[in-house]
Amino acid sequence: MYKIQTFNQISEKGLLRLPQQTYQVGADVSGADALLVRSHLLSVEHLHPRLKAVARAGAGTNNIPVEVFTKAGVVVFNTPGANANAVKELVLCGLLLASRGVLQGIDWVGKQSPSLSYPDLNQLMEHHKKNFKGNELTGKTLGVVGLGAIGALVADIAIQLGMKVLGYDPALSVDAAWRLANQVERQENLTSLIARSDYVTLHLPVLENTRNLIDRKIINYFKTGAVLLNYSRDALVDDSAVLDGLNAGRLSCYVTDFPTPALLGHPRAVLMPHIGASTDEAEDNCAVMAVDQLRDFLENGNIRNAVNFPSLHLERSSGTRLAIVNQNVPGMLGQILSILAARNINVMDMLNKSKGDIAYNLIDVEAQLSDDTLADIQTIHHVIKVWAV
């Protein structure tokens, strides 16, 4: 029986993919093989010897101490792209809100007296609507910073709206490049993209080299009156720099899904309460993807979309499979195979991959693996975790 402890409200569409005959699932499950979370903040207190994996039903893993879990041999999964369409649609909303006087117009209408006659209201609207005039997106230039699943979709919809699209992503993968529309004009550096864009939208993870990416220096490269959109992470932007840009007129609007106290009440800041992935469809997609990845890992040892382990898939060649996590140092595989050979355990198939300081092995063998064999492998120096799948 596999045990999964859940945090937050996980979509039933995902949980129903875990067979009741083989999975115990719930918020009160203890000693779990895996944790399934959305935004719940995990800590070292959630670690225990049986834990093998954490799955985040979402793209970001800022609520998970990934480095701590990695050292303990725990795989951390996320679900990149599962909520991409939901975020894309909100970016489109942000582009429109920053371009037209929609919010201001709605606010003005809401303040009118209901005692007005219809002709008087119409006359007022005709007189004041010039205050809410905006600009069309067609013909404008959008700079997309980060060309992953969300960035590629944002680029596509902007092209469909008749915008010129510039893209910048120094870590663009081959798969992401294939997904990218050929109309996107790749930029070699961030400053050239910003200098040419009427709108700039951020779609990057928070890393050491992206934290406070938009700072006082970068703000000066924006066109006067440009719009900045951030539906990725608050830490990508230095709030004080953005405020300076807004107050000086360098930025005409800042649209973000991550309000901070410094931005509250600013007339040219459009602040949303972190609702980028808050759709029924996105929550379903994230939960289904997270559960499917957990099942394949727990039942077969395969890894897909882990942020701290290498991707690895091995078709079953026997009924007994050994999974081993170890530090990525030379000679580990030879020591493991020596223990199996000493017990006359024949290896049918195997796969070994590494990522950074972590290596992961799947080994299919003919014989059943005794507890003593697993214990002996566990005693090898630099082995972190070992179990039979």
Image (spheres, rainbow, N blue to C red):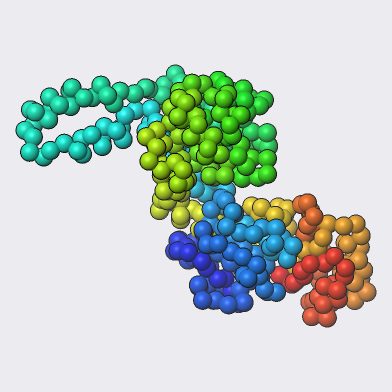
Residue 101 position by quadrant: top left
**Whether residue 148 can be seen here:** no
* Percent position of residue 297, x then y: 66, 63
| Residue nearest the observer in this picture, 45 or 299 | 45
* Percent position of residue 132, x then y: 29, 26
Q: In which quarter of the image is the C terminus?
A: bottom right
209 left or right of 215 in image: right
* Percent position of residue 147, x then y: 59, 35
| Residue nearest the observer in this picture, 91 or 125 | 125
* Percent position of residue 346, x then y: 87, 69
307 left or right of 18 in image: right
Residue placed at 83% from the left, 81% from the top? Answer: 372
Residue placed at 41% from the left, 43% from the top? Answer: 264
Residue placed at 70% from the left, 62% from the top? Answer: 68
| Residue nearest the observer in this picture, 181 or 117 | 117
Q: In which quarter of the image is the N terminus?
A: bottom right
348 left or right of 175 in image: right
Residue 229 against residue 388 in the figure, above or below: above
**Whether residue 212 can be seen here:** yes
Residue placed at 19% from the left, 38% from the top? Answer: 111
| Number of disc labels | 0
